Image (cartoon, helix red, strand yellow):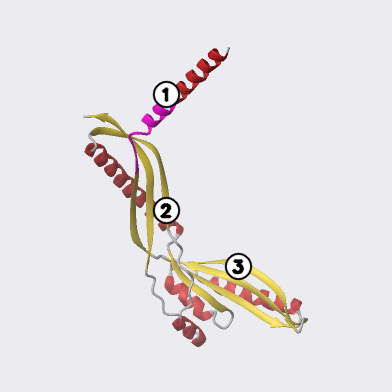
Amino acid sequence: MNKLYILLIGCLLSFTGTLASADDGLRYNQINLHASASGDTENDQLVAMLAVQKNGLSPSILTKQVNQTMALILEKAAQFEAIKTHTTRYSSRPLYNKSKISSWQVSQNIKLSSQDFDQLSELVGDLSDLANVQSMTFSISDHTLELVKEQLIKEAIAKFRHKASLIAKQFGQNNYRIIQVSVDSNYRQPQAVMPRTMAMNEARGAPPALAAGTNKVSISINGSIELTGKH
């Protein structure tokens, strides 16, 4: 009985070793690859964040004032066909003095976006007496970003395939197959800023001086291939 048990254990160990060797063989000709494509893309969208803020003793009166001011801003913005509006972050909070409520602050933000920089710049100047400009940011619009990504994906995949073919030939193989691949994009929305010159222009009620610039978009292809077929 003991001899039979030992024999069975030996067979199992031998079979496990064979599987491990076979598995190692499957991974023997696999190579990890990386390819990327990137480019600077013109910013074609301007986004302005404005805030209407009122301080006082009565939260209900402040709320009414903020709502009226925001309605006026939306009315002015509606005169510009190329500008999109989106109200955000409404808040009402007490202000304290020595642990007691001394007054209230009610505020609401509005996001203005447009691909017509002149129109949005003009509107921001017109609104300088109604709201505070929190930031103005240039970015790439969603539509343009998708088009750019599609082109960069094609370029990155072409580079990946070229590398794979080159490596296969250098190792004496005439073909390869893809084991796995992943596609990653990298585009960081620019940080919203409010330059000093823009603040000065806002104080004068004049349109801020702006320059769109560019942002970099990149696509990365990571994957592994298995070399197949010797010359």
- Residue located 43% across and 56% down the image: 143
The residue nearer to you, when weighing 19 against 151, is: 19
Of badges 1 and 3, nearer the viewer stands: 1
Residue segment shown in magenta: 18-32
Can you identify the residue that label 3 sits on? 87
Q: What is the crowding at mark 3: few (fewer than 14 residues within 10 Å), some, or many (at least 20)?
A: some
Task: Classify the position of the N terminus by image quarter.
Answer: top right
Q: Main secondary structure of the magenta part?
A: helix
Q: Which mark is residue 185?
A: 2
Q: CA distance from mark 2 to mark 3?
A: 30 Å
- Residue in the picture at 55% in, 16% down: 5
Q: Which residue is mark 1?
A: 18
**Which structural element holds mark 2?**
strand
Query: Is 14 left or right of 231, judged from the image as shown?
Result: right
The picture places residue 63, in percent across and down from the top left corner, at 71, 75
Q: Quadrant of the C terminus?
A: top left
Residue 27 among magenta residues: yes
